[in-house]
Image (spheres, coloured by chain):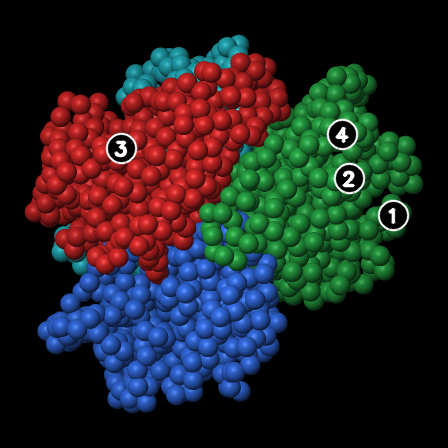
Chain colours: A green, B cyan, C red, D blue
Amino acid sequence: MGILSQDILDQLEKQAIELPSWAFGNSGTRFKVFGTPGTPRDPFEKISDAAQVHKYTGLAPTVALHIPWDMSNFSDLRKHAEDEGVELGTINSNTFQDDDYKFGALTHEDATIRNKAIDHHLACIDVMDETGSRDLKIWLAEGSNYPGQADMRGRQDRLQESLQKIYARLGDDQRLVLEYKFFEPSFYHTDVPDWGTSYAQVSALGDKALVCLDTGHHAPGTNIEFIVMQLLRLGKLGSFDFNSRFYADDDLIVGAADPFQLFRIIFEVVRGGGLNNPDVQFMLDQCHNVEDKIPGQMRSVLNVQEMTARALLVDTEKLRAAQVSGDVLAANQVFMDAFYTDVRPALAEWRESRGLAADPMAAFAASGYLEKIAADRVGGQQASWGA
Amino acid sequence: MGILSQDILDQLEKQAIELPSWAFGNSGTRFKVFGTPGTPRDPFEKISDAAQVHKYTGLAPTVALHIPWDMSNFSDLRKHAEDEGVELGTINSNTFQDDDYKFGALTHEDATIRNKAIDHHLACIDVMDETGSRDLKIWLAEGSNYPGQADMRGRQDRLQESLQKIYARLGDDQRLVLEYKFFEPSFYHTDVPDWGTSYAQVSALGDKALVCLDTGHHAPGTNIEFIVMQLLRLGKLGSFDFNSRFYADDDLIVGAADPFQLFRIIFEVVRGGGLNNPDVQFMLDQCHNVEDKIPGQMRSVLNVQEMTARALLVDTEKLRAAQVSGDVLAANQVFMDAFYTDVRPALAEWRESRGLAADPMAAFAASGYLEKIAADRVGGQQASWGA
Amino acid sequence: MGILSQDILDQLEKQAIELPSWAFGNSGTRFKVFGTPGTPRDPFEKISDAAQVHKYTGLAPTVALHIPWDMSNFSDLRKHAEDEGVELGTINSNTFQDDDYKFGALTHEDATIRNKAIDHHLACIDVMDETGSRDLKIWLAEGSNYPGQADMRGRQDRLQESLQKIYARLGDDQRLVLEYKFFEPSFYHTDVPDWGTSYAQVSALGDKALVCLDTGHHAPGTNIEFIVMQLLRLGKLGSFDFNSRFYADDDLIVGAADPFQLFRIIFEVVRGGGLNNPDVQFMLDQCHNVEDKIPGQMRSVLNVQEMTARALLVDTEKLRAAQVSGDVLAANQVFMDAFYTDVRPALAEWRESRGLAADPMAAFAASGYLEKIAADRVGGQQASWGA
Amino acid sequence: MGILSQDILDQLEKQAIELPSWAFGNSGTRFKVFGTPGTPRDPFEKISDAAQVHKYTGLAPTVALHIPWDMSNFSDLRKHAEDEGVELGTINSNTFQDDDYKFGALTHEDATIRNKAIDHHLACIDVMDETGSRDLKIWLAEGSNYPGQADMRGRQDRLQESLQKIYARLGDDQRLVLEYKFFEPSFYHTDVPDWGTSYAQVSALGDKALVCLDTGHHAPGTNIEFIVMQLLRLGKLGSFDFNSRFYADDDLIVGAADPFQLFRIIFEVVRGGGLNNPDVQFMLDQCHNVEDKIPGQMRSVLNVQEMTARALLVDTEKLRAAQVSGDVLAANQVFMDAFYTDVRPALAEWRESRGLAADPMAAFAASGYLEKIAADRVGGQQASWGA
């Protein structure tokens, strides 16, 4: 396929990116959530929408669920997913939308509330047993807004204690991934604000606990590919939440804000042995506030694929030679040569070779699916990012 | 009163900080809005709550309204405010919660939608005529999320055109203040992202158009007091929206995140002749997501007052001498001496001299008002930040 | 030439990027300046090196000078430049390396020092008369490190006063461009920290005063292309200092840190009529701390050219249609399609059609120039960024 | 002593803050280093100047050295320090000012250069044996400026290998502290950019290796007190480099930029048992670019002392009660009450009770020391930050 070698194609063949069920519901900002005709009203409709992404791209065979948003008869949901050609993936817990959790969940001062939050996670593991999911993803929306409000140290200790109880319940083939986030929804301190904290917490748990890296959850200017490198080196990179940002946790389409950063991240994934490594789960976590959701997800997985192809094109032998000799401009040029290579025609060819449309965005648009769901899904309550 | 001279007390006597009606409704993040018992269900109840702040602090004689959230019979509302001991203040327009405005309002590509947004502002001026308000505050929540999505230049031109139509409708004693904001709810470009843009836009309108500076609406690291200085110098600082932040537009209590920054800001206000100058309106714009709203507003106006007292304590003669002589450490020390002076006892005395409680927070807590509204305001729909 | 239309080639043909003489001297950080064999020892050698960049790329016909670093017999220097195939360009003043300027130059409290700084600028205009330069570029390295140290307002007023005296001396065809910078070398306040301040200052001077936008001089997260758009709209964008950054004013090779940002910037230049518009001077301002200087400058002008080609490839008709219809994903895709197009082969062809080497980096490396200057320029004092 | 209890005074009595010898030399930015009359010309004169700070404040009994800047006859230097009333402290290595280290030192691709850097550290440990110093502080100024330039993963592995060789040489009572820094002098990647990396590296070494936290070395917005809490919790906080910043690594006087942040940091030190704990070394690391150096250091240690007094004033019982009950405003108020308390008069009293001047800044100014050294230290080469 033109510029892509068989070896690269073999690696692209294996690539799989998990979709988040909640990306298909409405989402927005604290100011306004804009609705769209056809937005799913239940987990089954979300799965159907997600399956469209896989149908046209061949890149997204699994769908992550959010509990309790996606509570269902999971044997039915699993069957529905299979019928649609996808599988259920990571289970995400939710401890940020209950009034009890105003001042914390796994870290709360009150053992009753901590236990409630722990029980929720145990219930999530029950769901995993039903869905056959391997990963429990914990994003901790806990923290405080004002200096003095919270005892940060006590919370950190309680967090470890709570996580241990959850960890103890994991099956042999199950894992826990702990996401970190710089800020929001708390605005002074966040209980797991950085990779170091997540790393320290999961290291104290054991081998089945790993770090989840969301590409939008860092301070301005952070060199994210460095963290990717470090976590792979330490054997603790469990999964990615891909998205992009200009300012805060903007949750834009991955690769939209800084394509070169995505290139550098995937290059380090490849460098560190994380590509198509089952231990390192690729996943999206985005909010399509103003754009169509299904095409938004399609664009996202295509962006990841294109950038993976570019990262695989780096002439690593030439790169190493330039690095070793201290030839800064030559090393950078080898790197940029791959980034600036237009891989899109070759990927279109590759799609066609697998029976997919060369232009998945156009093919999906032409399919009439969006019009159909807009007509069919009238009435009921549309799912939203927050529910 | 101890360390505060009569001259300083005279200036504090005149200080007035406008409260935003919406601060008394529930607010939150895109993840969750936590409710509180007793939250107002209509503009009348908001005014009553705001009046408590003034009753205990003597600092907040006016209340800003948000249209359409606070649509009412304004003659009744005005009367109600007077009965409660306060007055109606700035009118805030809202062009971010209507589905039509998904891609802009005053800047929209479609003239029909632009006109709708312009008409909304004209209706706001009608409200001002009824309420006797002087200021129309425009915060433009417009922008785009993806590069290429919008024609930034065309939007800027349309913005000017729309503003001119609104400006033309202002009465002789009315003003328009244009707020700028770095980002959110848009995540790639914002149509009025910085003071320079607001300044250029209002300068093209005329003398009755000025800039509104929200202390939470800047890039990380921005020297806000410099902007205060510059806008006062240029004669274009129309009003403040006070709040504080650690990260983005956190909308925390003013002075909570960086008290020294608030000190520096107020020092420049004094330096530039903006204190107790009717042309420079002091106002709060905050979201009390996790703390009680009425005491949250009280703490805020007290913070502004305390910091004003500290700023007025700067020995400007000594400061100038050190500045002129290039004595960096001496100049900084004069500055810090004022900041580190404990003005709280003197302000408590001052309150008592005016018949107010020395400790307004404690007095309000003891008043039973929160318990009363929690009991009285059962049923109905609580007001929220977004409605 | 393949994907580039004749119209695009015509525009690329006209493109010219000015080089800074100081980029050819050694530069570094406050920790260390690493030297290189062959570094120029005087302005003549700098011009010779700069001419190499033009010789191999055809993109850099002029060289900016820094006074007093490049003080010379200017008629000789002009002649030398012509012999080397380039011309002298913008004159940069320097008010940051004299002990007198520790606390300011054009803004200093002391009129004697202000006058010294003003006189320096008048001398720069004398140089411009000799060199035939049009532009006087003023970067004001003035500010303060500690709150209270300086009277920011007084400094702003004195700055205007000083600039007026300099402005008054400009010839009819001469211009003054005022650069702004977020921070450094001052760490609390900077006297011209943002485009708004530069705009306000030059607007008060007159039509021959404009803003210089250095792409590395903004707060983290700033949407620079928005500022480009705004300044072009206001008719006040006088020149660019191109470079790139990950953190602060890193002065890296333009396009190295965020190529997509460079694309967006140049797209707005094109959109606003600034491309190949003599009123908008393109210039580099970079520090090659660890890479070779001449090839570093070559890579830089090539990056600008490549990105200009990509920006010109945007299908603006299709883009407008998508923007008008609110099709976010389509608009973004049109934009990205241009960015992801590989223009390098077509530009290589274009170079060959003009008698240049297809690969200028390789051709220069093969020329032996670096080896030659390393051998020839032994002894003497190498020029450094700071001298 | 007024508001300070005996318990608080006992803790203040024990407080000791180490001074950096290099703070007494000239320092500046990459643009200019301004000199001052009387600047030390050798390590002996630096020690004499440092001793003045201790003489007037009683807070700074030890002085850190930088090798090779402070290479001396250490037995003489030790004797000189004792004569002046101070002791020698932490030894700082330097691997950033040798041409060999352009592309790294402990991480360099070339084993010869790595070994040179390792040997330098072994030599530093020899110095420690002579000076009786406990701590070897390593700040790694290594990294790269361009994506692709360096193999980040290989460097991380080599770093560990190099550190192990250094660690192996430490005596039983000696420690190694590894500093992290967000960026500068490298502008793309830094080999130890965050606390997580330093923590992972020192954890792999052993108990005698700990993290050094420089308060100026974080991304914008980072909650530093959280890191202090976490490192104390993990038993890995070895030392502080105190200073302050508005933008990057500004190296301003500690407490100058954000006094409230310093308060929060010291509160967490106290909370975590780090105050007056020999395992947690307090040290300054600042550059006095525009202010006088000796008074600048005095102001710094006084700021730390004042803020420690305020942090010790927090009514922790009341704070815990408010935290446990979820009373956000009350908890914050307890915290702020301590911050806003004016401890300066009580500390002046405390100084007098120990035979020190109530106002150390004034007493030092009156002593004539600055005038004396300006007269005495004529000729020779002034020490500078970089040498």
Nearest to N terminus: mark 4 or mark 2: 2
Q: Residues within 10 Å of mark 3 (few under 14, many from 20)?
A: many
Q: Secondary structure at mark 1?
A: loop
Q: Secondary structure at mark 2?
A: helix
Residues at discs 2 and 1 in contact (Cβ within 8 Å)? no
Nearest to N terminus: mark 1 or mark 4: 1
* x and y percentages locating residue A65 in the rendered image: 78, 41
**The label number, if any, that marks residue B367 in the structure image:** none
Using the numbered discs, state the Cα–Cα distance from disc 2 to disc 1 in whole angstroms.
Answer: 24 Å
Q: Secondary structure at mark 3?
A: loop
The residue tagged 1 is A132
| Chain where mark 2 sits | A
Q: Going by the image, does A201 lie left or right of D210?
A: right
Residue drawn where x is 49% and y is 26% of the image: C349
Look at label 4 and name its amino acid: Arg
The residue tagged 2 is A13
Nearest to N terminus: mark 2 or mark 1: 2
**Quarter of the figure with residue B181:** top left
Q: Going by the image, does D1 lie left or right of A174?
A: left
The residue tagged 4 is A351
Mark 4 vs mark 2: tell me if same chain.
Answer: yes
Which mark is in front, 1 or 4?
A: 4
Task: Compare residues D291 and C356 and report the one nearer the observer.
Answer: C356
Look at label 1 and name its amino acid: Gly
Q: Residues within 10 Å of mark 4 (few under 14, many from 20)?
A: some
| Chain where mark 1 sits | A
Look at label 2 and name its amino acid: Glu
Using the numbered discs, state the Cα–Cα distance from disc 4 to disc 2 in whole angstroms.
Answer: 10 Å
Task: Compare residues B370 and B343 and report the one nearer the observer.
Answer: B343
Mark 1 vs mark 4: tell me if same chain.
Answer: yes
